[in-house]
Amino acid sequence: MSPVGVLALQGGVSEHCAMTGSLGLDTIQIRTHEQLEGISALLLPGGESTTLISLMDRWGLTTPVRELGQAGLPILGTCAGAVLLSSEVSEVEHACTQESLRLASVRSVRNRFGRQTRSFIRYLNIKGLDAPFPGLFIRAPLLEPLSDKVEILAELSEGPVLLRQGNLWLSSFHPELTTDTSLHRLFFESIGILPGRI
Amino acid sequence: MNEKRIEGSWDAKSGLARMLKGGVIMDVVTPEQARIAQDAGAVAVMALERVPADIRIEGGVARMSDPGIIRRIQETVDIPVMAKCRIGHFVEAQILESLEIDYIDESEVLTPADENNHVDKHSFSVPFVCGATNLGEALRRIGEGAAMIRTKGEAGTGNVVEAVRHARAVLGEIKQIKAMPREELMSTAKYMGAPYDLVCRIHEDGCLPVVNFAAGGVATPADAALMMQLGMDGVFVGSGIFKSGEPAKRARAIVEAVSRFDAPEVLAEVSMNLGEAMVGINISTLSEDERMADRGW
């Protein structure tokens, strides 16, 4: 089985690797575009989205990842990773001209839930999961769909927090910071990397 | 289904620090510097009135920054904003929390307010980072509620030697505890002055329960990459950036070096033509009361 890639320039990299490891998947950390060759899926971790996009540009990853996403490579972005996937990025307090991969028809609103003291954990009902999932929101973005191709898999009173558009999954919370592998499993099942449940 | 939101939990506090891994946190004293830091790719800024190098030169009592400066920096950048309170000064910490600062550094760079006690960090919803020179000190701070640890190093010197000493001390002691038979853990806890349950956890996990950053004396991309290769999770740069000849360039180079810390050819490239580094201080020329790392316990 070809390995799963985890973008490893900054952020919660080892946490995603621990998730894929516990699901029995080979994992490769991606720092250069050569390492993208042959991966079966890509995880974009949480971190600082401004840092991540500038480092992706610097190390020549932005264009290859965008092209792989357009060609159908399954990509899961969590928090900053979801901001990277979005077609539009805005910020609650400031005008914002942040670059992104512009793959999913989604506007991410950075820091929509407030600063760190407002970070929270709350159980979520996620379409496709039987049990409530512990959603850990850390300076989280809100994810607004801009197209009817975008499916909402979970939402809070403020708006959507888990979206899917074809091969692209965007989560405003951090499944990789919990011990619950069910959301990662759901992603890998939906793309046929893990066998689906009957 | 539980509809309740729980704010300020341990997972949220230590989780933000995990999101900063592989990143550079930069000291800034003005909104303009904060903007330069963000544009260079900093994962967070530390809002200060004076960088440590200036605190050394000017002397006097160093305190929490003017909340007005902190506010203006918060209004300027989208990345997390940290600020320092004095060791044991829980009212400065309360003020910083009320400003909705993202992280508090209970820092030896400021003049300590309490020579015996650090802040009870469990009672705050804002997370804390604290300095440590060895594992016992790191575990005492985690026991008090610190959600992130950093080396103390020797701030404002541009000399990385103390940060290396502290990093090696913490990582070396973790290895020893990991390899130890269980029956030796209690006497080790007693000897180190560390909470027993945390010593047991180190024995089981072989790592700290929180992230561990380098701080204090990092001045070049090579310094930053050295700390990462030693096993640190990320880097604080204080005086090293805005006391150098070309801050924006150096800030960017250090960010790039941390993201590719194990690729020497990349480090060579990013280290070229950065202008003057900050003028360093040899630690041995500092008198005892000029050494910030000895503050706190």
Image (cartoon, rainbow, N blue to C red):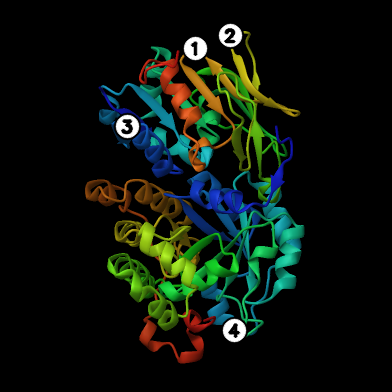
Residue pointed to by mark 1: A166
Circles 1 and 4 on the same subunit: no
Residue at 43% over, 49% down? B252
Measure the alpha-carbon separation of dots 2 and 3. 31 Å
Crowdedness of circle 4 by 10 Å Cα count: few (<14), some, many (20+)? Answer: few
Q: Nearer the viewer, residue B37 or B224?
A: B224
Residue that numbered label 3 is attached to: A24
Answer whether residue A153 is visible to the viewer in this image: yes
Q: Is residue A58 above or below residue B26?
A: above
Seen at 36% across and 81% down, the residue is: B282
Q: Earlier in the sequence, mark 3 or mark 1?
A: 3
Helix, strand or loop status at disc 3: loop
| Callouts 4 and 2 close, C-beta under 8 Å | no
Q: Which residue is denoted by mark 2 in the rendering?
A: A149
Q: Quadrant of residue B246?
A: bottom left
Q: Pinpoint residue A70: horizontal percent, then vertical percent.
A: 42, 13
Disc 1 marks a residue whose amino acid type is Gly
Q: Where residue B59 is drawn, which disc sits there?
A: 4
Q: Left of A31 or right of it: where is A83?
A: right
Label 1, residues with CA under 10 Å away: few <14, some 14-19, many ≥20: some
Disc 2 + disc 3, Cβ < 8 Å: no
The answer as to whether the residues below labels 4 and 3 share one chain is: no
User: Could you say whether the residue bearing mark 1 is in a helix, strand or loop?
Assistant: loop
Is any atom of residue B66 visible in this view?
no
Q: Residue at x 37, y 51 (%)?
A: B258
Query: Which of A90 and A77 lies nearest the eye of the viewer?
Result: A77
Chain containing mark 4: B
- Cα–Cα span, label 4 and label 2: 61 Å
At mark 2, the secondary structure is loop
Tell me which chain the residue with mark 2 is part of.
A
CB under 8 Å between discs 4 and 3: no
